[in-house]
Image (cartoon, coloured by chain):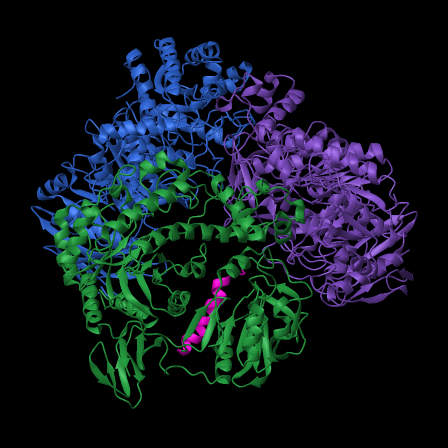
Chain colours: A green, B purple, C blue
């Protein structure tokens, strides 16, 4: 939906005038205009200024900023300031301060440093939000609401313990059911009173193992993740509801963070008017991984355009090595966001801080303070281009025949697993399959287990370890109706409580896949097996390396496409396909090298006559956004050199250069085409 | 001693029927019988079910299980369930929960999560044990008791501090003595009141340095290890005494864990009727290291047969990479245990859990739930074989002329040392010497410092850093009487309080060894020296690499066999031998490469005319168990291919195949022979 | 100043007779005399013995020790014993025990384990010191006072929080000023009440990132470092003032630790009569790094001779690999200290402990207890030499025309920076430049930002990130008056509160350097750029590798000496020089390989006609100490082999051998010459 007040790409970013004397604000406005900025995100961290003591509000400076923006023809994405409570509040209500997973009570500091179940926090934040909403509801500059900031703190305090017990009562009804679901007779953990339940922390059932958390009771730990995701969501939703009550027509969002593990963004998305997210790839990022995250964010609300709420115009400050974005990269990556569904291109930050930890994070206006910088020029040029694009592309959609399932609860469960291998990680498995489609320029939707599958030809579910209720039925229907389904090793094993489905792996998926997995071997990192496809299936043949896990598979109706090359299970199926109704269900029983996945994906696409949008040289990305029969084709050259692309015989309008192109055409290094047809 | 109720190999494992509906129990019985299982370990973690609220016991389900086992012709190794107190108990008696070395009070969760000095824990656990003992004392299925499970938690709570002070009063009598033993005038730590003593935690005198603990006061830290080992032992012993009072004829054990550092198993063994232990090697394990642990467990009670209480039939879940045991490996490794003195072969677990952290640990009955699996077939075959062996081998012994000293207190002291090198680790040094004998198929007893040495020809004491009172005298007597003694660098330095023996290293061992060690050089990992033996001693000559530490040795009666090859101490003695009475005392002044140790061990064996049991190809292990003049020779082929072994002219009965063999005979890959003669 | 009681090199070390029975003391005296020792540092950790209960003092044993020393012709460096409070005190006044950065209350143990703001600690320590001072003020053995020991503990307790608030009030006067300086509007951290301020710990604003600490608010963290350095200093000063009141003529020191980050030693030095420090290089130490630390210690009090308070005669115990000092190394390194300004050569320790963590630290008298050791002989020989040198060299000075700025506050600020690179470390950058001069045998003074620059020709300020008030003006005056100034990338950015100087980098240094740094690229460790000097400047030309950070520089009056070789800023200035008044200001915009720094330093020295003291082979170090027109030239051969040095035509007296040398002369492996001329 195009914003009626500002029917254009939102272009701007986080702006913190409260860090500066007023004298600078006027200069900021001049520079914003020069940079073709039309939206500033304000008041992200202003609670202490807006409410200097309890119940006493002071909006003077914010009034001025809002007015000034509007006077200069700009708009405000108004934040609720609740991501960091004032110091006086932490002191007055120490219950607001969270307790870490190591059992330590935090002190005031940092940000998102509150217990999400603190009623004091919720009351005070909602009171502020009501004040803000009432004060600015009719302000002409207001175009969007930005609730909190980068939610995600987990807390383990007594207050959370109480709330957790309540949450469990609602989920399970009885202790009998809870004992069953958590499998508490294991290690004699049977619970006879709700009060005996303690949050799973490093002092009880969990432990740290490098960057991943381990647990002795997966069921408890997964439920605590759900509960904590819900708890932060309740904070968000408390604010959201007040805002919608007061300004029902202004879109509300909060800035998400891509594949951020602590929060189940699919459950959050239901309560957001529009998805927004912060994209901070390193200079060594793999482009397909960024693309996947854009598609995931788009997928959260079923394909609805999203906001790129934050990116840096040149460098980060918090990564180990914060290299500069090379000339053209900021523009290229901004268009990549648009190419994947963004209708907004925003930066963190508009003016660079003088002090504290983000002062070496890039900004539109650097410490130099003027417009004569490479970064400012690039920002200004991009603003100019986006302005020219007008509302043409806005609210257009992407049509994908392929979907990849990405599910937070499955992610949590997979990585809480004790065994078979500590190298079992969810996101990299999803990224591998995504990359194969990306490299072929075949559009992909990122969906979760609950999604409607009927619109897809191919559905891939890498590491679908947890199969939630109803999912298997929908998958079977999808395949019966002709769909192609692919899943991998270590799939189908457990239900939503991480209880193994008895009778043989892959559990609920066994019939669909037509196999029985008897055992799963775990390989040391220096060990490899291979997948041998001796009889070609289309393009699929030859020998490929595999590792990590090797399922030992027996066929129960499925057919083996490839077999293991070595070890005592040499010759046993490593890749299988099962004809199920009108469709096919594939099983990849080990973790193959990328070259296999590439050929395999090409094979299943061929079977479904799914073709690349265009055939282009390596590292050239192509997507399409469609609106009312108009197709916008994005061609992004990620190479550091110009390449030739074949645009075909039909002349198309390239919107950025305003040229009409056809046939073999040179796209410059890091260049972008947006072809309208 | 052969169990009169079940005069056969115990074969079975941990069984947790309380995790399953009763409907499944009957199926379990059928499968157990099919697998030739005769013993199930039950009630390991059942406290919460057996005592749902304080003092109210419910044995209904356990009665059924015990009866059912007996009805089906099977027996119970009955556990006391005290390794995990119920949640209600942790809540009611929070003093039961331990405090970590980092000073954090634990919450309910995990297992062995109790303060071993909690009187509430001891009272409650003993009350349960009395109930169990009284109830099942006459049950025909009862063949053994299994107290607790894998003891070993250290606690640092105030209650432990009090108990520690009492323990110290009993050990030292006066503060004057304690100050002297702990050397408290160092850093002004003199104590004037018992109450001033605090447990050595990360908040006081200790610190973590990677996987090892460091300390500023070795004397305090070693005493706390002793005290904590004693504290857990007191928990065990409290249960043991009640059981023996009620069922004096049923053997009692608790499952140990091999080279488990926190507990001094030699002091525990005195209070165990039979040793049992859990053997969980990784797929990359070195076979001699497993063998050494079997021998150590056998050595705990002076050679008495032990129980292999737990091993996995296929894979673990808690190691980083939990590979499958290849076909035949479970059988081979089971016989390895028997070959080293086990009269029991048990698994963890009989039926695989559906939930929680051990659900991907291997089991006899997998999640598939039936007998048609590789693992079940292998288990069943082994059960069949063991059944056929009857009681023939039971209670037979191993005769060794060589002993290696392994001492927990010495281990603790060595690795608490601040300097000379963080790479100074005890167990690997012991393993190196053990391996040399293992590779030659020469039997070894693992003994501690207090053992009677008179039955041995050779005694090796690698890294005998701490020499406890009386030990030196016994060593001197041993050598005087013709024995061969070998020790290494960094030996003889301290007494039982880690106080240096003044006057010159190696302290108490100086006279026996006939040397004075003036200094000890520590080499960086990238530095090496060499040992040069220019004049051959038997097979011993040539040049070998050495590193880690290099003692600078002066001869005081001893003779140099080898000298350093480089650095400022080049030419000084690196290997010495001292004629002492009728025997010889050797000193290895640095850490040599394995090739040297191999030749050195061969040399001292030649001197004593100690020969391999048999000459066999590499990776073939040979042991002998002897009973009433019958010798059972075990030949284990650890190779993944068949090899030829020369069995000699005499025809021998191979018990597993029931064939009569002699001369050159092929033993298959991973094959086992048990020859009776 | 030469000590009137003992006008000679102090030679001896830490002596802990309280760890030994009196019977041993007489033997110690004999051995000390044999080793030519004249000073023993006593009572470093004797508080518990000196004050066995509150207010009750017992000096009996110390009286005996002091008397015995004097009777044998030796002197005492008398310590105040306050580095480790007695256990009874920790128990009686638990507020003395500190709270760690992780928020954990420490228990009794270790040393320097007190809250530096504890009034109980200060009262009790000062009471003890008054007793000591009054008792021994007229003791003839007393030649120096040694306050505490290796200060440096940071505490985060409530008491420190209160003291911090008071310190801030004094520093900033008002909360308005504090909010401005700390930039608290960032993340809404505005403070309205002093009580809202909490120390920056891991529970509030800081976090651990490997061996460095990170922070979200640099301004707060830097102030806490200042405050903690001041807090420990207040403990020291409290003792110092009492001592000076009682014994105004006896010099007072405390042993520092070189580049020890927690304490700003330049601010400490103002309150010390003489600097002393503990030098513990590993066997893999780079010699220039040791030399730099000696020069830094000398620089703390503007070139005044310092005491080498501790070094080991053979090996340490607390490093990972504690190798022996090879024969001659202890002597060589002792003379290196003297060559850089030490008038004292002392050891830790005189007699090796029997127990606790330092028992494997080297000592003059080893556990063997006699004089027949390599180490004792080396110590004795060195003592003999030093005795022969008499007071000749004492109180002589080093003349340097080059100064390198080393500033603790800048160090803290640089490494607290969030971005651009985690590899940005201060000390290695200083070491690189120091090494270039060291390798050329050009003397260097280590000074801080506040130092008087007028006596130098060249001033180098590597990584001068923080420029404190007044510094820029002094630098500009220095260059105007003909000086050569060199600074590097990431310099000039912030003021003393880590607030960026607005308008363009390098901030305050911009005019002096004549450049504007638009951006700073951070390179991954595997990335490199190069510096190309195509037009030779003297010896300076060719191509050099650089990395870490690359400033993108625009000339504003300066001239480019070299340019980047690659990336989008290829061809832009990488090395610049600005003519400013009569001098030159250089900027090194990236982190070059050592080969470049070597040539660059040679170039600027050539420009100033600064020559090496002597031309000598590699790894031969040459320094000069000057006194009343006598020049003492130290030649130290760090090679493990003899080398030839050219001493010139003039015959000079070599003091150690008492020979007269000239022309080409062989200096033995690890040999030392002290030439008088």
Q: Where C624 falls versus B663 (above or below)?
A: above
Give the residue furthest to the front: A245
Taking the image as shown, residue B554 lies to the left or right of residue A288, namely right
Q: Quadrant of the C terminus of chain B?
A: bottom right
The foreground one among A46 and B523 is: A46
Give the quarter of the image for residue A285.
Answer: bottom left
Q: Is C528 inside the magenta-drawn segment?
A: no
The foreground one among A79 and A665 is: A79
Residue occupying the point 68% across, 52% down: B280
Q: Where C448 falls versus C86 (above or below)?
A: below
Q: Main secondary structure of the magenta part?
A: helix
Q: Is residue C435 visible?
A: no
Q: Where A276 falls versus A456 (above or below)?
A: above
Q: Quadrant of the N terminus of chain B?
A: top right
Residue A416 locus on image (x, y percent): 55, 55
Residue C648 locus on image (x, y percent): 24, 41
Q: Is residue B190 visible?
A: yes
Residue C445 locus on image (x, y percent): 24, 37
Residue occupying the point 48% across, 38% down: C324
Residue C483 locus on image (x, y percent): 13, 43
Give the residue furthest to the left: C581
Residue occupying the point 74% across, 33% down: B126
Exactly how many numbered labels are in the figure? Answer: 0
The foreground one among B139 and A82 is: A82
Q: Is A424 inside the magenta-drawn segment?
A: yes
Range drawn in magenta: A423-441
């Amino acid at each position: 939906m195009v914003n009626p007040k500002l029917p254009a790409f939102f272009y701007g970013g986080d702006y913190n005038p409260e860090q500066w004397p007023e004298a600078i604000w006027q200069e900021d406005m001049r520079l914003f205009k020069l940079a073709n900025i039309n939206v500033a995100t304000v008041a992200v961290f202003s609670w202490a200024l807006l409410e200097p003591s309890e119940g006493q509000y002071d909006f003077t400076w914010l009034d001025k900023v809002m007015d000034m923006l509007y006077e200069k023809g700009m708009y405000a994405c108004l934040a609720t300031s609740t991501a960091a409570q004032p110091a006086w509040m932490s002191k007055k209500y120490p219950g607001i301060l969270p307790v870490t997973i190591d059992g330590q009570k935090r002190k005031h500091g940092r940000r998102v440093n509150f217990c999400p179940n603190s009623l004091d926090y919720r009351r005070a934040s909602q009171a502020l939000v009501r004040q803000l909403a009432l004060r600015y509801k009719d302000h002409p500059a207001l175009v969007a609401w930005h609730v909190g900031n980068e939610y995600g703190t987990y807390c383990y305090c007594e207050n959370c313990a109480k709330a957790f017990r309540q949450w469990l009562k609602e989920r399970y009804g009885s202790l009998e059911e809870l004992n069953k679901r958590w499998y508490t007779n294991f290690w004699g953990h049977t619970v006879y009173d709700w009060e005996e339940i303690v949050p799973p922390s490093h002092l009880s059932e969990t432990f740290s193992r490098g960057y991943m958390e381990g647990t002795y009771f997966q069921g408890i730990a997964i439920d605590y993740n759900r509960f904590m995701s819900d708890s932060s969501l309740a904070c968000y939703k408390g604010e959201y509801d007040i805002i919608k009550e007061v300004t029902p027509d202004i879109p509300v969002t909060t800035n998400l963070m891509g594949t951020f593990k602590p929060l189940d963004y699919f459950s959050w998305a239901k309560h957001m008017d529009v998805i927004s997210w912060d994209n901070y790839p390193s200079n060594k990022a793999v482009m397909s991984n960024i693309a996947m995250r854009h598609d995931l964010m788009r997928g959260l609300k079923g394909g609805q355009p999203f906001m790129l709420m934050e990116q840096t115009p040149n460098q980060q400050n918090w990564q180990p090595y914060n290299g500069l974005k090379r000339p053209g990269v900021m523009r290229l990556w901004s268009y990549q966001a648009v190419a994947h569904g963004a209708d907004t291109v925003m930066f963190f930050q508009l003016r660079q801080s003088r002090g504290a930890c983000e002062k070496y994070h890039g900004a539109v206006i650097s410490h130099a303070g003027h417009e004569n910088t490479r970064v400012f020029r690039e920002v200004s040029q991009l603003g100019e281009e986006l302005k020219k694009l007008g509302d043409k592309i806005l609210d257009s959609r992407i049509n994908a025949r392929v979907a990849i399932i990405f599910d937070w609860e499955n992610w949590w469960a997979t990585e809480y697993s004790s065994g078979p291998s500590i190298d079992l990680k969810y996101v990299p498995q999803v990224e591998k399959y995504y990359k194969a489609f990306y490299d072929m320029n075949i559009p992909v939707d990122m969906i979760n287990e609950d999604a409607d599958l009927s619109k897809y030809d191919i559905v891939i579910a890498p590491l679908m370890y947890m199969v939630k209720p109803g999912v298997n039925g929908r998958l079977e229907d999808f395949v019966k109706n002709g769909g192609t389904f692919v899943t991998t090793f270590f799939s189908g094993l457990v239900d939503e409580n991480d209880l193994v489905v008895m009778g043989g792996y892959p559990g609920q998926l066994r019939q669909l896949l037509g196999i029985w997995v008897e055992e799963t071997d775990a390989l040391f990192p220096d060990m490899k097996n291979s997948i041998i496809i001796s009889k070609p299936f289309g393009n699929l043949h030859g020998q490929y390396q595999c590792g990590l896990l090797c399922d030992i598979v027996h066929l129960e109706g499925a057919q083996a496409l490839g077999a293991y090359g070595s070890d005592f299970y040499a010759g046993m199926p490593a890749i299988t396909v099962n004809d199920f109704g009108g469709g096919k269900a594939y099983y990849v029983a080990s973790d193959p090298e990328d070259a296999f996945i590439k050929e395999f994906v090409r094979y299943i696409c061929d079977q479904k006559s799914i073709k690349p949008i265009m055939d282009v040289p390596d590292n050239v990305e192509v997507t399409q956004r469609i609106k009312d029969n108009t197709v916008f084709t994005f061609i992004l050259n990620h190479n550091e050199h110009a390449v030739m692309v074949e645009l075909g015989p039909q002349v198309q309008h390239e919107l950025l250069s305003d040229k009409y192109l056809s046939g073999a055409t040179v796209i410059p290094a890091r260049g972008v085409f947006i072809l309208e047809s």
